[in-house]
Image (cartoon, rainbow, N blue to C red):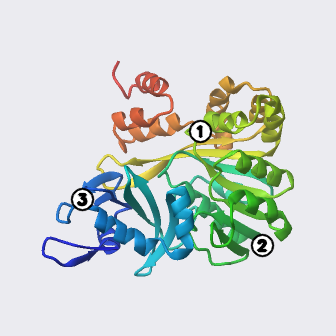
Amino acid sequence: MKIKNEQDKYIDLHDLMIEKWASDLYLTYWEHPTLRINNQLFKVDQLPQMDDDMLNEIRSNLVKPEYAEYFTKNLSLDRWISHNWRRFRINISKQQWHIMVVSRLLMDTPPSIDELWLPPIFKELASKTSWIILIAWPTWSWKSTTLASILQEINTNYSKHIITIEDPIEYKFKPAKSIIEQKELWKDIVSFSWSLKYTLRQRPDVILFGEIRDLDGIRNALLLAETWHLLLASIHARSSIQTINKIIWSFPSEQQNQIRTQLSENLIAIVSQKLLRTKNNKSMFAVQEIMINNTAVSNIIRENKMNMLNNTISTNKKYWMQLLEEELIDLVAWDKINISEAIDNANDPIYLQKELINRGILKN
């Protein structure tokens, strides 16, 4: 993706992303190209504001003929491209009748659990042979990266048949002990629901489902888990409670008790994570709430006593469970993040403030 600068020279925007260590690039009508660096936005004022001609030219270069019908129908398209040996995930959409483009720089290779400094429980999760592991949070929280690290742990240490179903493919895996097949929407599959339905015929051991988006996705995920497959997936939710409720409330009321039972039996863990800036604003790291489905958690889900879940998570640290607030408190105490950053990102800001006061970290 190239545009001219003030000196009438072409600048490649993806080269600029790589040079500035930007995670994302935003191209929108009558704005300067904007980079996201350490979760902060920086407008590149040396480059011109984007007009319709520039945006439409970029769109025509990105939306190849095989994608044109899909974009015309859905007005949004995800795909990945390669540039200078780096990979980028592109989203093309519309806003106020104008084209908008967002590009994300992807890591070259799937990271390991150790490289992400994830707790040891993640290696135990990778050893499971069936049921569901969910990574939750809204966008830009490294959900795909965490899922990729678990999958890489399986690939490195276990002999499995792994199938990924993605839109688009974010990390390209090299088979190690496992066989890995990666399927991309509109290249290899016509829909997520269709693919999940027929994946069983391909005799997988592990299925990575990029994102659970709707009722069909949830229904098929539960079906696959009940047939003794290990399913890894992401979902948009902020906490374990919200994730469970979102799944259950997606179904009609007459089916919800049955779904509670299925979920209580087939869920392994929910990891809710978010990216925060360090106190010096020089880097980003993930903070996590971790819920492991033991007997107590299973009973809470089945009996619909969700008001008891946070307390159960908080009192089961020996099983590597933790509330998001507990990690935020530790990071404030270690002077890694600001108190305001912790409060702004807590699921329960009131609880967090009370605990900071009780522990002498925050003055009343």
Q: Which mark is residue 159?
A: 2
Question: Considering only vertical position in the picture, is 90 above or below 84?
Answer: above
* Placement of 64 over or under 231, stated as above or below: below
Is residue 115 at least partly visible in the picture? no
**Where's residue 181, x and y in %?**
70, 74
The quarter of the image holding the C terminus is top left
- Which residue is situated farthest in the top direction here? 364
- Sequence-first tag of 3 and 1: 3
Q: Is 363 on the left-hand or right-hand side of 356?
A: left
Give the Cα distance between marks 2 and 1: 31 Å
Name the side, left or right, on which 173 lies relative to 229. left
| Label 3 crowd bin: few (<14), some (14–19), many (20+), radius 10 Å | some
Indicate the position of residue 362 as horizontal and vertical percent values: 36, 26
Relative to 152, residue 322 above or below: above
Q: Position of residue 127 (x, y in %)?
A: 74, 60
| Residue 322 tag number | 1
Q: Are marks 3 and 1 in contact (CB under 8 Å)?
A: no
